[in-house]
Amino acid sequence: MSLKKYHDKRNFKSTAEPKGGKSSNSKLAFVVQRHDASHLHFDFRLEMDGVLKSWAVPKGPSLNPTDKRLAMEVEDHPYDYKDFQGEIPEGNYGAGYVYLWDKGTYELLDEDHKPINEWKSGSIKIVMHGKKLKGEFALVRLKTGEKNAWLLIKHKDKYATEKEYHIDDFTPKTVLAKDKERGSSARKPKKAAVKKAAAPKKAATSKTPAKKAAAATKATAEPVKKKPSPKRPESKMKAHYKPMLTTLVAQAFDDNEWIFERKWDGYRAIASLEDGKVKLYSRNNISFIPAFQKVADSVEKIPHNVVLDGEIVVMGKNGKTDFQSLQQYKKTQKGNIRYVVFDLLYLDGHALTHMPLLDRKALLLDLVQKMNDPVITFSEHVVGKGNTLFKKAVSKQWEGIIAKKSDSNYSEGIRSQQWLKIKHHNQQEAIIGGYTSPRGSRSKFGALLLGTFKGKDLHFIGHCGGGFNESLLKEVFTLMQPYKRDTSPFMEKVPMNGPTVWLDPKLVCEVKFAEITSGGILRQPIFLGMRHDKKAKEVVLEKPKTVDMKKANKDAIKVGNKNVPVTNTDKIYWPKEKITKGELIDYYTQMADYIVPHLKGRPLSLHRFPNGIAQPGFYQKDVEVEQMPSFVKTVEIYSSSTEKNIDYIVCDNAATLVFMANLGCIEMNPWLSSANKLDNPNFCVLDLDPGKINFSAVVETALAIKEILDGLKVKAFVKTSGSTGLHIFIPIGNTYSYDTSRLFAKYVAQMANEQLPKTTSITRSVATRTKKVYIDFLQNSRGQTVASIYSARPKPGATVSMPLDWKDVNEKLRITDYDIHNVPALIAKSGDSWKEMLKVKNNLLQVIKSIEQME
């Protein structure tokens, strides 16, 4: 480890700080030094490879496990620095007073690991033996934000406390008195001022992370000089920020780990100010300044470089927002315009997105209060009492409420389960795909024909004729005229209520409605307004998700009676759709009862995508048995190719399924045979894999194969592959060999190929089947795997390998019809079409005899 950076920053002729030193102790040392420099902070140092790895902790360590202390890694310090205490003279780097707050020894929680390796991995777990700091701690490098940003966290053990922890309560009064004598930054101000990204003071009676800031309306930020410490370099403001998105859930809840805000009915807007230049834009980076210059003027008055997130609204009577007045504001400039801000992403050279939400809101509140501008207002919140706030939302006729995990980071562009929305009114963004002619005295048009996208297809969701006055009819009619077309943009045949004009699916509006029918049609939709801030392709039918709020951002979730470790649930796995790892885990948790029976007892090859589908995945067969949780079953199988035994995972329970999903296993790939009879497959499989040919050819091939099998009195089941084709499964028990299974599959494939020679192929060579459907029968071999039913696939749209009724194999079938978001609801409604599949066992010997007789 090099001390070059340390030496380069110091003049040892004018500072008493040590130059070096070596340990003569077999035990590893730690030290915590209270450093009153340009701003007060605590230096946390761990001995590793002959030096002290060092972190600047602005708020100091805590013994309360709910405190996640930001720790900025700085340059390595020499070993002898562990004993340094005293004054660093003015003019020197880090000038100020250093007090040796605590020291002692530490060891790794896992004694088989090496400290430097854990540091490289970004996760250091230790047991500390100090006078003040005792027990288990973790240092975890943040995945987002600045590269040197870590969190210092106390583990729950006998040394931990649930009480609020103030580090200076454990600092000698003589040291605090010296602070006052020096007039240092450690003194508490009479009035707080926002100068940089400091964390908020704690409320006196707080216990949980959310209560620590209690109401952010009472929290303030520590005053520091505007110029940041040399130890924490400034971050550059990004040119464009994508807002963090919410997930719709069905009902409100109470939880002290969450805060709850009003859901504002307006335009979501990001505002930035850098060196006097203002930007104000929508989530799609469309400038709002032409329409809302008054908001931009107020942002320009902020005495800091900032990035804000909030909602532009027009406030009506009794505190209600008026969305239609907001739409008219650009023309009229009339209305009580407000920019209601609820998050602070950047402040004076510091990216704040990695900070806990309540810390960001406390800084934001201080900024807004000092602005005292009537246009920029702060979105207040309550802690823990979601049901109470939702009742208020109903009585006040608000749009709904927002629930946010109190310690959540700001995940740009992600629809996170740490931010949830609960609506009072059912509302839906919709595409205008056409309109009907007016009737009677009505002018311009009768009703709008609405739709939402599913993949690339526009699906009809209903007619909307309510909510219009004469002025609005004229305005919307004028907007629609440039988009007229001759044909319907909808996938389905639309019920016609009279002459209809079709439109290109470009215009987005918002409606409220009574309910969604089982067929996906909105009942009693009422027009609310146009949504020029939304992209048409992003408009999908929004249905409430089942979310266990207590699972969000936890180290483990309860699956049955098992605790399953989960990590990085906000990591994006499908970048285009912004679908996270957490959503994949939620899907498998919901679907476990349907998937596990088809995985039980069968070895699995793990296809892992730990960084999502945009990055290369990898296959893993052999697992470290000793590292598996107790609920994970494995089976040892000899591999002739590697000439060694391989330990495969066997998924016999829901906890194992979720465990694999947490490893990044997007799809589940079981063998065709069970571990107790490896050479005898449970299924014979035909994989229909299309080249550059229309999907209708796949459907035609599948139906031809079904006809062949029906003639042989063989019962078969079909599912989408979740990728491009279809899989046909023929249950055969575990009675026959793979050779027998493969010969039968080959016979069926040849018969289908003879019937459809122009559109099918059984030749493996890709060059000879580029415009044909390849009927793959060679999968029927020992060790080969096929994606399980209900398995998610690492493909765009988070598609699922969906079991089908044969009647669903028709010209309307699309692979994209089934994804991790809609499959649970479809199964809950219509049931599992493969429910009886595991009970079926075709008699291949009898079938083969009948074939021989026919020949």
Image: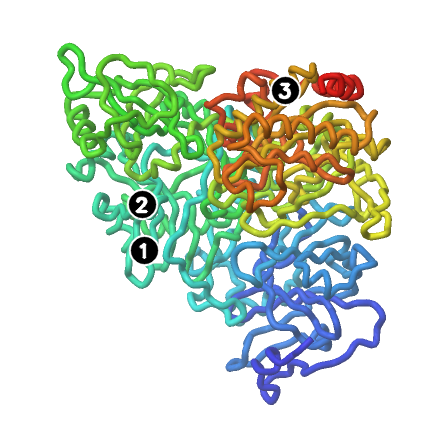
450 sits to left or right of 437: right
Residue type indicated by callout 1: Ile
Q: How far apart are marks 1 and 2 (CA)?
A: 10 Å
The quarter of the rendered structure image containing the N terminus is bottom right
Quarter of the image where one finds residue 829: top right
Q: Distance between the residues labelled 1 and 3?
A: 75 Å
| Residue that mark 1 sits on | 302
The total of numbered circles placed on residues is 3
| Residue that mark 2 sits on | 376
**Of circles 3 and 2, which is in front?**
3
Q: Do the residues labelled 3 and 2 touch (CB within 8 Å)?
A: no
Q: Earlier in the sequence, mark 3 or mark 2?
A: 2
Q: Earlier in the sequence, mark 1 or mark 3?
A: 1
| Residue that mark 3 sits on | 708
Q: Are marks 1 and 2 in contact (CB under 8 Å)?
A: yes
Look at the picture and state if 688 lies above or below 808. below
Instruction: Check the image and name the residue furthest to the top.
Output: 440
Look at the picture and state if 94 lies above or below 384. below
Look at the picture and state if 580 lies above or below 596. below
Q: Which of marks 1 and 2 is nearer the N terminus?
A: 1
Q: Residue at x 58, y 82 (%)?
A: 8
Quarter of the image where one finds residue 457: top left
Q: Which residue is drawn at 30% across and 46% down?
A: 286
Residue type indicated by callout 2: Ile
Residue type indicated by callout 3: Ile
Q: Which residue is drawn at 62% across and 29% down?
A: 727
